Every structure is written in C-alpha cells, then in structure tokens.
Image (cartoon, rainbow, N blue to C red):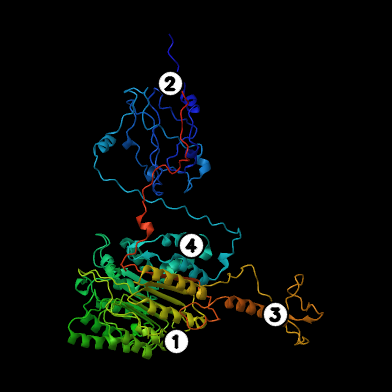
Amino acid sequence: MAPVQRPSGRASRSTRPVRSSRTKVDTYHEDSNSGEENMDPESGDGTWRRASLSLRPRDPNRMYREESTDTSFDGEAESESDSAVVGPAEAPTTSMPAVPTSESNANARPFRAQSQPSRRMTASSKPKQSKRRRQQKREVGRRRTKRPKIQAEDTIIVGSGVIPPWQTLPYQVLFDIFRCASHPLFNEQLNTRTDSAKWLVNVGLLCRSFLEPAIAALYYSPPMLPAYKSHALMNLLSMPQESLSMNYASKVKELSLDVETLILYKSSPTLGYFDLPKFIERIPQVQTVRLYHRSDYILGIPPWNIHQSRWGYTEPIFSSIDNTGIRLRGWEWNSRFCETPKLVELMTQKHSRFAFHGLKRLRVLHLSESEKEADLQTATVFATALESLPELQCLEFLESSLVNHEILLKLPSALQSLTLCNCDRIFSHELTSFMKSRGGHLRELNLSHNRHLNLSFIQTLGPSCPNLERFKMDISMHDWSSYHDVEPHFLELLTKSEIPTWPEKLQQIELIQLRKWDDATAEVFFTSLIDAAPRLRDLRRMLISVILKIGWRDRASFRERWISQLERVFLRRSQPPNPNLRSIRKRPLQSGALANERATHPEDGALPGSAHTETADGGSFGPSQRHSARLAQHRSSQAEEITELSPIEPFSQPLSRDIQGMCDVVKIRIDNQRPTETQFNEDDFLDDELSGDEDWDGQDFEPAPGHAW
C-alpha cells in the first residue's frame, strides 16, 4: 500500500484561517523573506515555525534577526541562544526606514502558531528546547523584568509645501533660531548630553549659510562632558585659529562644568587632568563662568549634611581671567568649594578686580550660619562685597541661611531680579523694608521654599515695585534631614485686613501651595485680583494653587464660584488673529466728510479699499467714519456682553464693567491635599504591563465541526 501523501506546507496553510488583525501589526520581527511560506506545525518534518516573540518595540539602535527555522549540521533545530542580536558589523548595508509601514508588513507578518503541540506530533518531532529555556522554566521564583512603556508615535506635521528661503536670513537671526531650538545642550542634573549637539552639526552641514551660525550656537555654551571631548575641545582651541576655517575660540561665551567630574580626577591615564586655567586662557570672549557641584540641585539638605568638596577655588583660575582680559557678566559662588567665612573674604577680594566690575548676574549657594557673633561680622563683610558690584542686575540666593535683613538693605538699588530659595532667615517685614527702599527697579521676584516668609508683604507690592513683571512664590518645603519638616513656620499666610496690591506691569503670577488661611481670607485675596483686573493689561499667565482645609461642601462651592469668576475675568476670549490677513495702507482723511452723518457699516458688496461708501439716506462717508462705526459697534457689543454678567456674592459692589480678558493661561486649583515634595496623579498608578493581545479584533478562530479522531 502506498504511503499516504501529506499535503505540502503551502496547501496546508491555505486551508488554515489567519486572523486578519495579525497582519496589521507593525513589528521588528518581520520575516526575512516574504516569499517563503510558514511550515505547518502538523507536518512531520519537524521544522515548523515557532511563534513570534513579543510585540513590544525594540531598541531602534540595535538590529534584530528573526529566529531561524533552519536546522543545524547535526539535524537539530538551532537553540534560542543562536538567534542572538545582530551586531553592528552584521547590519545590512541598505538603509531601512525608522518605522516600518503597515502596507509593507501586511504580507510579511507570519501568523502565530499554536501554543500547544498537536496530538499527531510525536516525541521525536517535538522541537528541542534550549538549555537556557529549560533552566528558566525551573526558576519558578525568578524576578521578572518590567516591560518598558511603548512610546507614542510621533505626531505627523503636515506642512504647507512652501519652504521659505531660510538660507537668506542674516547670521544673527539664524544664530538666535538655532540657539533657541537646541537649548539645552547638556542636562546638568543627569550629567548627560542631549541630542541637540548632533542636531546642530547636521543642520550646519545642510548649506553653507547654516554652518557658521549652527557652530556658533554649539560653541556658545559647549557641553563639557564626557571628559575626552573636553580635552579634544582644548586641543582645538590651542591650535592657531587663523589656520582653521573659523575662529572657534571667539564663539565660547558661557562655561559650565562639574568640577568634581572633570577637574578633580584624571580623565584617563593618557589624557591626565583637565587644566581649567589653561582652558580659560583659550576662550577670551567668555562672559559667564559656572563651576557647580552635581548635588546642588537637591533642595532641603541641612547645612550640617552639606559636605565640603575636595576641590576648591585656586588663584590660577582668577589669574588666568585677569591675564586674558576677560570681563565677566555672570559668576557663581558656592560654599561647597570654600567654607562660608573664607568664601566671604574671597568674594571681597575678587569683586574689587577689573574682571568683576561689570558683573550683572551673581548666584550664591549654601552660605550657612554658625555662631551669632561670627554671623554678624560675616554678614557685614558679605554686604560690603555686594556693594562692590554697582552694575549687578540679577541676584540669586539658594539655601543661604546667612542672608538677613542687613544684607537685603545693602543690595544694589538698580537690582532687577531677586531670587530667594530656601533661605531660613527671611521674614515678611524684612522683605517689605527691602521693597520700599530697593524695589523701584525690580522686574522679577522669585520667593520659593522660604520657611518663615508669608504673604504679608504683598499689601505693599504694588506701590513698592511698580515695574514688577514676574512674581513667583512657592510655599512647598523640602527637608532631607531626619526631622523631615515640610511645614512652614508662620501662623497665618495672610490676614483679612492685609489686602494685596498688584503692580500694573505684571505679566506672570505663579503662586503655588498657598496654605494656612481660611476661606474668608482667600475671598479677600481673590477679590483683590478681580478689582485690579482693569489695570493689569499686561497679565498673560496666572497659576494659583490653594489649599483650604474646610468642609468639602463649602470647598466645592468655593471652588466653583471663584474659578469661574477668575476665568471669566482674566481668560482670553477673543480668537487669535488670522495669519492670512494683511494690513491695509492708510488713506488720507477726506476733508469734505460731514460731521452729522450717521455711522453705519458699509454694504456687503462694497470694496474695503473704496474711498466712499453710500449710506442708506444717500449720503457718503470716508474711511475715518467707517473706522469710527466699527469701533462704536465693537464697544456696544462688549458693553452688552459685560452687562449680562451678573454680580455674584460675596461682592458688595457689582462686577467691574471692564474685564481684563488677556490671559492665555489661567489655572486655579483649590483643594485640601496635603503638600508633599512629590505630587502623584492618576498616571503614576496605571499598569505599564501590556496584555500582549492589543491587536485582537474580538473574533477567535473556531474549527469546523467534525470528529476529533
């Protein structure tokens, strides 16, 4: 009897239904040859195709190879370890798209085989498992690795098809565009470079006019890590700049580096130490120098736990600055590199030098207090050191408990920006005295994480700081000590009698975690904002977060009433201007226009550029009368809209008829959440694990009715 002829793999596949949704999944596990057909698992040759692994996206920088079904020389199937990741040397030379399309994968996607072997499959025909897979099955309690999140697909931006002549723009315009688009080049908190540096290089290679502005944006504040690239930059700047295609040394304007990572230790046995004084001599156009520590971004470290760095300020650094003729515009003093008493004396000596006379931006970190008698003398010397900087405009104090009332009163009168972050000896009445004497030129005020500072100073904010544009205050506290004290040390944030006043030039208001007050005081605060709305014409951004510990019903009604009021008064209601509109050239006024003509709209058929338009009574009026008519109608419509707004309690007077309506962002949050250093939301508690069957369309394969034997 002739043996039974089994159907071939192609025939058997044609009779097996394939889930249509499986052919629509984009994956890197594509079949290397779309023309080959998958072998049926019931065939006796033992070379059936295994199921694809996971549908999770793989690392785009690595190339993967599909599991091979070919048998090895000894006739056994290859183990899983043999189908390893293909290295860069094995990558194909042809360029592949970054994201495969669904059309190209529709026919190349192999269907998933059955998870259980068929009954007809004998022991000899079962695929042999690798040693690694058998070992993993025996490890029942082994730790499972968490699946990474699937990144969302990039938004496809559909352009108009018109490419402006970017290469014709001036050098300075291109430089500003590239610098804003590539900022930042380096992440100081993570000590890692961003992809912006590579992007600038690629942009510079597009055309000749892009090269120099892109390189200038790259070298403006060059990333100084990893260490071997810093040494390469040193070698480039040491070369005669006349022999190079451009003067790289003159393009470095800012220098920021982590001293313990780059200077304290050897970069490598061959490179040796990085010579900072020599590097400063190679960049004569530098204006800002920042020598920072990687732990400076951690707020709330108690002074007794701030350890001194092994690196310290040395005289060769300042000698190089003087010898090169550098005139600094920005500098940073850090008490980690020198103890507070010695640092204050060093500041007094260096501020008198020529390089610091034009200093405009100064940042001071970790000036801690010690004994009271010594603090008085240190504070006096520090105030004298600040008086030596007449052109100082921006001053930042970070975690400096030495800053007190005497230091604030001796700050330069031309100060435009003041930042007080986590300074424990700043009180509201001291800040009030400073604003009355030194707040006339202040444009930015940033008060964050100050434990003893409440909002009592805000009642004199308007008259004391008439030019203030940005006002930010964050009352959240950070404390990494064993006490973990995150509560402010004042009894009340604001009283009912302390009515806030607001400068008319304010552009941004950001008040975070306002607490320790009741609903009556909060109503006084919000009422002051609404009353000042007609004068706050420049306000464009408002963020206020309030914590009220009252009953949930009262808090809900309070939230609904005041959020709607603030959004109706401040939020922008007008549509953005039409980019397709163009300004019309003004025409001279008509001298023969009648003064008693009635202002009406022109007819629909009238041209906007015509000199005269016929009215209903047969008269005519010129462009000036038409403009007056449109203006009158706009004012009447606005008045009708405002009159519809009825006053809402607890106001004693009707709502102001002139609504601000110019803010692009109005975010008001009123709740009773306990303030913490890290705020969690719903996204932090979602499951990152995927079920593995996201492409299932809801229909399963059902075999045809028949016998199972």
What is the crowding at mark 2: few (fewer than 14 residues within 10 Å), some, or many (at least 20)? Answer: few
Q: Amino acid at mark 3?
A: Ala
Q: Which residue is nearer to you in this view: 387 or 692?
A: 692
Which comes sooner in the sequence, label 1 or label 2? Answer: 1
Mark 1 vs mark 2, foreground winner is 2
Question: Does residue 274 appear in the picture of this structure?
Answer: no
**How packed is label 1: few (under 14 Cα within 10 Å), some, or many (20 or more)?**
some
Q: Secondary structure at mark 1?
A: loop
The label shown at residue 707 is 2
Label 4 residue SS = helix
Q: Position of residue 693 (x, y in %)?
A: 42, 42
Location of residue 334 with respect to 274 vertically, above or below? below
Name the element at disc 2: loop
**Residue to which mark 3 is pinned:** 629
Measure the C-alpha gap from mark 2 to mark 3: 89 Å
Indicate the amino acid at tag 4. Answer: Gly
> Would you name the residue on which mark 4 appears?
204
